[in-house]
């Protein structure tokens, strides 16, 4: 060891013996951990222009009340990028319009799984569950919505109604 | 390994070139006892001189760039200066040799790691926006066309090359353009004879190193620190993941001007103390360069600190007005000599500032209206102060500004951290203020004028940016705060250095404070290193074929060459259809340059600029000569007005008319990957799909005419039912196609169960998808090397209705690492 240190001194590398090495160590650990994080956790889900294109198309169709075509477009967007939360929300609202409560419930459940902090998502999920007759799970969803947004009127009214019953 | 060595060599070449160009002034201007330290400034002075000469050629002399001559002259002067000053250089080298060896470790490590990140694919432009792609195309114009008298030497955009010409033709001739950094890339690209897209990251890496060296110089003289104490400060700049952000988001000009903003006030302070060329010349060079590198934030980044420096000298140091006049008298001719078009840029930047603010109103004499606007704006802003506490945008700002997460979430862990932070705006806000507080400590601690000025500018700017938070314009806040980053990072580095001093030499409480400073700034280093590590590993492990976050441009890469060679067979403009991102359209335009092309309606609807914004009107209304003149006065060009009008006449067609012609002529189209027939062409009449060549992650090329394969008798006649067209399967059918090497994917969609129809040949993989009674079967075949062909037999149940047969060729022979594998 002493031989190594004297060799370092000889080479003008006394630097490594002092606290001067601290930034180098921090950076080395940081770089290694960063690179390893990519290897271990993998790359994140990138944006999908294809999915976006279908989503835009679906929104255009939905705004002109062509609901069946809009559903097809949104489903294509979903296939292209299953992690895009907005697509589930858009599909859910169409199923609500078409009074297909089961599908609406599935869509909003997927939506809140991806966006658990969306009070509106929880409200619409609760509405679908209420229409399906799942009152207790609907109340749970309303409570969740209220905890996220204290001004969610629909949730307040529903919980109030439920309490009176 | 070879690519790594080439990368290291390229970086070393650029640094060497800049040093050679700047070594002359740095040696001649430096005090005799400090010759060696002043060499740290040589690359910065060199790059400013190279850019100044290049810009003067394009803007003043109106001649094309000639880097061999310019760099040759500058390097010869440098060699002469080296010869004259050799005893001092030798003495300095002898004295500082051990220290230099230590100091060079972080720089060498950066150079090696940066080269390593690009080792698998070679240097290539990385982009998540559009600016980097635009720079590449503009630099190509500067290299090959501008002022060369070629047929393409004109600022007039061509309708059949619109995507390529839009960001390059006009801008490369604009008077109002920051051309300095472009000239650096152009110089290297011309000397190495490679496309500018490959040089862009080289310039970026070398600029980062130059920034670090300039900071070391500033610490040594501006903050009066010893090299032993100052060396960690530049490391904060080298590891900052914010620089990666600038790299992939095109803020090239911002990075190139960081050393100028940091060093400018110090040189001015010195010039005002002792009126000598040694201080005035570098300051003049900095002012001239800022106005060709990045003049937009100069009002706050350069002029405000310089104003403060003048105030400091006048009020504190009692600098006489005569001295001020003397400095100004020296400065003005020097700036004009170094940047002859400086007055034009100054007037244009002032005009922009006046137009975009209420100053314009004051200037016009509309005092009452302007004052009313200003008061109403301030009142609205201050009413939104509650946004400060609850804005969920704070996590975004802290993440990106301080390197907690990359601007693009390349790593899943990165995304999770960011998402977890999103719910906690208040801690993020506090950490943002904590970082700025530490930075202020670093800048103010030594009470050096340059630190106080830098700190004051940082605080003023950061606080002023809060106005945007109050107005809920969070992105503008982030952009404004980003301009304070050079001062903030400098302050953090200085605080770390000071903390180390406390830890080593002071007893008791000071040691505790030292530990806290080192700990907190160490966290900054760690998170930046972490993010840089993740981003670097991502860039290293992906290529153009599988990178969906970052678009990569290298015209020499096999993928782009193959795409260009395929498209060049068309002989008519290529239809670009189905792409909805303008950035991606620019990227594709750059990749297929110089082939003629046009955007289909499905793409141009997403592109709202230029000719496509007003499709019924000609973009160059040449008959209106007055309007034309107004346009032409914006350009630096050797072309006469008559020539330009003649050129503009060629493009004097409304887009709708040109579009119809292009569409009728087009025989090949580029559509998004895995798509086929473009919506703009008339629908196909048979069940046989078009020939499609797939370039993974880039585009699919669709052929309009001819069939992809020949089909032997075995299918019934074309019929139609309520589901659409079909042909009945009667007997075994041979499908044959002549292809180059690669994979061929044949998809058959038919009514029935998955194994009602089978494709046989040498299928590698068969995938069946069942859509409620309709089956899509996809099989992959390898092209036989001996015959360059594919022969496949379609067999199955007689009477099965076949809805479509399509063929898609994936040229895996491109050589990309992560190409499509079935």
Image (spheres, rainbow, N blue to C red):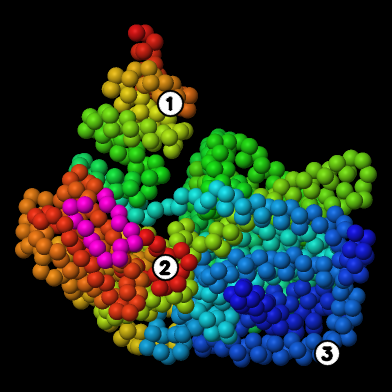
Subunit ID for the residue under disc 2: B
- Residue B102 in percent (x, y) is at 82, 67
Image-based side of B333 in relation to A108, left or right? right
Subunit ID for the residue under disc 1: A
Gap in angstroms between the C-alphas marked 1 and 3: 78 Å
Judging depth in this view, the residue of B38 and B105 nearest the camera is: B105
Residue lying at 38% horizontally and 85% vertically, measured from the top left: B152
Q: Which residue is mark 1?
A: A145
Q: Quadrant of the N terminus of chain B?
A: bottom right
Subunit ID for the residue under disc 3: B
Tell me which corner region of the image, top left, top right, bottom left or bottom right, holds residue A89. Answer: top left
Magenta highlight on residue B762: yes
Q: Which residue is mark 3?
A: B84
Tell me which corner region of the image, top left, top right, bottom left or bottom right, holds residue B618. Answer: bottom left
Say which label, 3 or 2, has the lower sequence index: 3
Magenta highlight on residue A137: no
Please tell me if label 3 and label 2 are on a single chain.
yes
Q: Nearer the viewer, mark 3 or mark 2?
A: 2
Q: Which residues are magenta?
A: B755-769
- SS assignment at label 3: helix
- Residue B125 in percent (x, y) is at 51, 69
Gap in angstroms between the C-alphas marked 3 and 2: 49 Å
| Type of secondary structure dominating the magenta stretch | strand
- Residue B801 in percent (x, y) is at 12, 55
Q: Which residue is mark 2?
A: B587
Judging depth in this view, the residue of B306 and B746 nearest the camera is: B746
Residue B603 — which label?
none
């Amino acid at each position: 060891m002493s031989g190594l240190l004297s060799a370092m001194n000889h080479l003008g590398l006394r630097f490594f013996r002092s606290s001067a090495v601290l930034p180098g160590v921090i950076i080395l650990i940081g770089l290694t951990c960063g690179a390893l994080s990519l290897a271990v956790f993998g790359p994140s889900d990138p944006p999908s222009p294809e999915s976006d294109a279908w989503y835009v198309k679906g929104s255009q169709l939905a705004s002109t009340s062509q609901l069946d075509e809009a559903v097809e477009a949104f489903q294509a967007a979903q296939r292209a990028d299953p992690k895009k939360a907005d697509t589930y929300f858009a599909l859910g609202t169409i199923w609500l319009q078409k009074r297909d409560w089961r599908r609406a419930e599935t869509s909003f459940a997927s939506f809140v799984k991806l966006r658990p902090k969306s009070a509106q998502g929880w409200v619409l999920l609760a509405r679908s569950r209420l229409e399906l007759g799942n009152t207790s799970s609907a109340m749970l969803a309303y409570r969740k919505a209220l905890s996220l947004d204290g001004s969610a009127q629909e949730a307040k009214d529903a919980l109030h109604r439920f309490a009176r019953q | 390994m070879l690519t790594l060595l080439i990368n290291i060599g390229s970086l070393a070449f650029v640094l060497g070139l800049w040093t050679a160009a700047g070594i002359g002034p740095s040696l001649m201007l430096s005090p005799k006892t400090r010759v060696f330290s002043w060499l740290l400034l040589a690359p910065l002075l060199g790059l400013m001189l190279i850019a100044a000469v290049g810009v003067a050629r394009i803007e003043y002399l109106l001649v094309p760039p000639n880097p061999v001559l310019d760099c040759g002259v500058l390097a010869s002067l440098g060699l002469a200066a080296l010869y004259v000053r050799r005893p001092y250089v030798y003495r300095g080298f002898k004295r500082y040799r051990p220290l230099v060896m230590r100091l060079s470790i972080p720089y060498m490590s950066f150079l090696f790691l940066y080269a390593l990140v690009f080792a698998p694919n070679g240097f290539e432009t990385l982009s998540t926006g559009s600016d980097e792609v635009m720079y590449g195309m503009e630099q190509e114009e500067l290299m090959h066309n501008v002022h060369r008298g070629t047929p393409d030497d004109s600022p007039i955009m061509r309708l059949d090359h619109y995507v390529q010409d839009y960001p390059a033709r006009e801008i490369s001739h604009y008077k109002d353009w920051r051309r300095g950094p472009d000239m650096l890339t152009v110089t290297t690209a011309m000397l190495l004879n490679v496309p500018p897209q490959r040089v862009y990251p080289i310039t970026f890496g070398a600029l980062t190193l130059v920034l670090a060296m300039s900071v070391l110089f500033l610490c040594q003289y501006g903050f009066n620190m010893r090299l032993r104490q100052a060396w960690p400060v530049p490391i904060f700049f080298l590891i900052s993941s914010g620089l990666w952000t600038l790299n992939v988001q095109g803020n090239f000009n911002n990075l190139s001007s960081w050393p100028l903003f940091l060093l400018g006030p110090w040189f001015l302070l010195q010039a005002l103390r002792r009126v000598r060329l040694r201080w005035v010349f570098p300051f003049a060079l900095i002012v001239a360069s800022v106005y060709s590198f990045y003049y937009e934030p100069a009002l706050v980044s350069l002029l405000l600190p310089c104003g403060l420096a003048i105030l400091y000298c006048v009020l504190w140091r009692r600098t006489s007005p005569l001295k001020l006049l003397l400095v100004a008298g020296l400065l003005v001719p020097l700036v004009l000599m170094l940047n002859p078009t400086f007055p034009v840029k100054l007037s244009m930047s002032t005009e922009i500032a006046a137009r975009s603010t209420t100053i314009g109103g004051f200037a016009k004499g509309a005092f009452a209206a302007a004052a009313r606007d200003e008061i109403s704006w301030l009142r609205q802003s201050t009413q939104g102060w509650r946004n400060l506490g609850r804005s969920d945008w704070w996590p975004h700002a802290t993440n990106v500004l301080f390197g907690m997460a990359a601007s693009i979430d390349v790593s899943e862990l990165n995304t999770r951290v960011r998402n977890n932070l999103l719910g906690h705006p208040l801690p993020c806000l506090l950490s943002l203020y904590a970082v700025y507080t530490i930075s202020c400590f670093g800048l103010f601690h030594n009470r050096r004028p340059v630190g106080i000025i830098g700190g004051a500018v940082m605080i003023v700017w950061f606080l002023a940016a809060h106005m945007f938070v109050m107005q809920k314009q969070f992105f503008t806040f982030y952009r404004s705060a980003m301009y304070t980053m050079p001062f903030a990072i400098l302050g953090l580095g200085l605080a770390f250095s000071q903390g180390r001093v406390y830890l080593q030499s002071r007893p008791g409480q000071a040691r505790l404070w030292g530990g806290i400073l080192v700990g907190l700034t160490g966290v900054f280093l760690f998170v930046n290193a972490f993010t840089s590590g993740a981003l670097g590993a991502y860039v290293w492990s992906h290529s153009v074929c599988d990178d969906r976050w970052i678009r990569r441009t290298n015209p020499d890469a096999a993928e782009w060459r193959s795409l260009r060679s395929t498209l060049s067979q068309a002989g008519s403009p290529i239809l670009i259809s189905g792409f909805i991102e303008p950035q991606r359209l620019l990227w594709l335009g750059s990749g297929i340059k110089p082939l003629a092309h046009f955007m289909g309606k499905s793409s141009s609807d997403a592109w709202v600029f230029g000719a496509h914004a007003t499709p019924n009107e000609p973009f160059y209304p040449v008959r209106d000569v007055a309007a034309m003149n107004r346009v032409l006065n914006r350009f630096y060009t050797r072309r006469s007005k008559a020539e330009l009008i003649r050129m503009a006449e060629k493009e004097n067609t409304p887009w709708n008319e040109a579009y119809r012609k292009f569409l009728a002529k087009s025989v090949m189209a580029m559509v998004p990957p895995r798509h086929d027939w473009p919506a703009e062409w008339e629908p196909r009449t048979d069940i046989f799909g078009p020939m499609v060549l797939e370039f993974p992650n880039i585009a699919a090329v669709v052929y309009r005419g001819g069939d992809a394969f020949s089909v032997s008798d075995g299918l019934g006649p074309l019929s139609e039912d309520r589901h659409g067209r079909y042909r009945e399967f009667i007997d075994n059918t041979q499908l044959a196609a002549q292809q180059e090497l690669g994979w061929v994917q044949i998809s058959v969609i038919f009514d029935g169960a998955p194994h009602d129809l089978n494709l046989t040949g040498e299928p590698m993989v068969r995938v069946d998808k069942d859509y409620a009674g309709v089956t899509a079967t996809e099989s992959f075949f390898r092209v036989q090397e001996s015959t360059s062909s594919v022969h496949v037999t379609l067999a199955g149940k007689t009477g099965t209705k076949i809805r479509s047969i399509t063929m898609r060729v994936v040229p895996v022979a491109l050589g990309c690492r992560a190409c499509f594998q079935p």
